[in-house]
Amino acid sequence: MNQKDKIILGIESSCDDTSASILKNSAILSNVIAGQKVHEDYGGVVPELASRAHQQNIIPVVEAAIKKAGIKKEDIDAIAFTRGPGLLGSLVVGTSFSKAFAMAMNIPMLDVNHMHGHVLAHFIDDEGKNKPKFPFLCLTVSGGHTQIVLVKDYLEMEVIGTTIDDAAGEAFDKSAKLLGFPYPGGPLIDKHAQNGDPKKFEFSRPQIKGYDYSFSGLKTSILYFLQKQTKENPQFIAENLDDLCASIQFTIIEILMKKLKKASKELNIREIAIAGGVSANSGLRKAIEKAAADLKWNTYIPKFEYCTDNAAMIAITGKFMLEKGLVADQSISATARLEI
Ligand code: KG4
Ligand code: ZN
């Protein structure tokens, strides 16, 4: 191994995925993710079950990441972990593991903001993929967050728009629940939407100032619509499933794109990135590509495995923190709330 090579172990445990990744300079050698099936029957993530599953998963996941990368644990120069935001009980597992690992190996540790991670996933080396140029706008859309972030530099970001209630991923998952899909239903809406008519049903759109979002009204509008229709025809959902999914997806994407286009126009920034689990959505990806053509945007969409929660994005963020000397000490603790 080259003397100057920097190897960072990334750890992510903010919600219901336990992940460990090995980063060498800016390239990912391994990115192991263990999901948690235990939540499927509950219609959402159960915090107590999540932290218990993280405890069971963390050591095997780290061992697998080290093995897959073909390195020894003694080769690791620093450990980066998600400090927040997220579920406290889940974050504590990754944080405690990282503190113990850093102490045992006598290496620095980097306390990463999960939301920085989603944005900075764009800087992982990926053959043939360009990286965004500063300043750029990043639409970060996940199960827990919906933000338009103005990214001025690697660790210099400002949230210019956010949701005042549900996140975009929640809008997908809650709508999916109303249609009878298991959690998380976002990917299932996406799948059915491919065969449906996006203009078949109209749902209400929020009227919110500035670059902020709101999705709770949409959920209520879908709920009332379905209640009314199923009263008249109990088979309504089953008979119209694809069109319902396509119409719901179309509405959510229109809401997301409207504010993103407004921000791009008003701030005169045409470097546009998307991040977070919902950026896996095929309709959103198409809408971004269309805007790129119509509005001359340069767009950046991370590889699928770096869109949803993963430790590779935590490791790359740790690299930028390490370069700036932003290291944590053993007094660091996890925190459920953390601003960008
Ligand atoms: O980033 P992520 O893995 O976890 C959080 O930090 O929340 O995002 C998970 C969210 C879930 O709400 C899931 O339904 C949604 O991303 N999601 C999708 C798709 N894939 C994942 N939503 C719509 N279409 C998809 N293809
Ligand atoms: Zn996330």
Image (cartoon, rainbow, N blue to C red):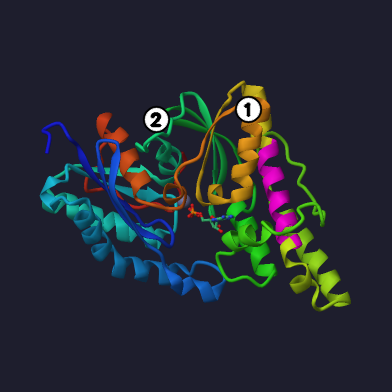
Element carrying mark 2: loop
**Magenta stretch: residue 17 in it?**
no
Residues under labels 2 and 1: Cα distance? 19 Å
- Residue at the spot of label 2: 154
User: Could you say where residue 217 lies in the image, as x and y percent from the top left?
Assistant: 74, 54
User: Could you say where residue 203 lies in the image, as x and y percent from the top left?
Assistant: 80, 54
Residue 155 vs 287, above or below: the answer is above
Residue 220 visible in the displayed image: yes
**Magenta stretch: residue 247 in it?**
yes
The magenta segment is 243-258
145 relative to 71 in the view: left or right: right
Residue 315 vs 246, above or below: the answer is above
Residue situated in front as seen by the camera: 117 or 69:
69
Q: Are marks 2 and 1 in contact (CB under 8 Å)?
A: no
Question: Based on the displayed image, in which of its 4 quarters is residue 120 positioned?
Answer: top left
Question: Based on the displayed image, in which of its 4 quarters is residue 80 positioned?
Answer: top left
User: Could you say where residue 179 lies in the image, as x and y percent from the top left?
Assistant: 69, 69
Q: Quadrant of the N terminus?
A: top left
Residue 189 vs 135, above or below: the answer is below
Element carrying mark 1: helix
Q: Main secondary structure of the magenta part?
A: helix
Residue depicted at 29% across the width and 39% down the height: 27
